Amino acid sequence: MKKLGGSVEGGWLTFGEYDYVIICRLPNQVSAAAFAVAVAAGGAVGSGKTTPLLTFEEGLKAMRQAGRSGYRPPR
């Protein structure tokens, strides 16, 4: 994780689809993808899921951009 410029924020055991959740902070999505690929290639983890998280500020910025995108659903 450190070699990718990241850190582990915390980890928890879970019930359900996955046995644990680890929250990591990485500098960008490419580093997050590199970490996911490295873990998968190692073979010790049966399955995993990477979910990018947004801060509230980033979420609001995304919503503002969406409002200005001009997208209209097909009719």
Image (tube, rainbow, N blue to C red):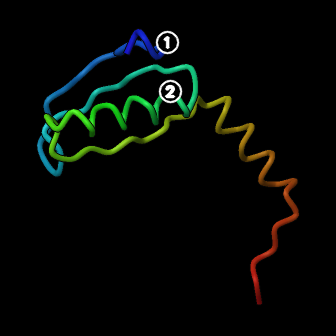
How packed is label 2: few (under 14 Cα within 10 Å), some, or many (20 or more)? some
Work out whether 75 lies above or below 63.
below
Residue 72 percent across, percent down from the top left: 81, 74
- Local secondary structure at mark 1: loop
Residue 39 percent across, percent down from the top left: 28, 32
Name which residue type carries label 2: Ser
- In this view, which residue lies farthest toward the front? 41
Which numbered disc flags the more N-terminal residue, 2 or 1? Answer: 1
- Disc sitting over residue 31 in the figure: 2
Work out whether 73 lies above or below 12.
below
Quadrant of the rendering where the N terminus is positioned:
top left
How packed is label 1: few (under 14 Cα within 10 Å), some, or many (20 or more)? few
Residue placed under numbered mark 1 in the picture: 5
Residue 5 percent across, percent down from the top left: 49, 12
- Total marks shown come to 2
Check contact, mark 2 vs mark 1: CB within 8 A. Answer: yes
Q: CA distance from mark 2 to mark 1?
A: 8 Å
- Disc sitting over residue 69 in the figure: none
- Local secondary structure at mark 2: helix
Left or right of 6: which side holds 39?
A: left
- What residue is rendered at 34% in x and 15% in y? 8
Q: Quadrant of residue 70?
A: bottom right
Name which residue type carries label 1: Gly
Quadrant of the rendering where the C terminus is positioned:
bottom right
Work out whether 48 lies above or below 69.
above
Residue 58 percent across, percent down from the top left: 67, 32
- What residue is rendered at 58% in x and 27% in y? 28
Work out whether 70 lies above or below 43.
below
Q: Quadrant of residue 29?
A: top right
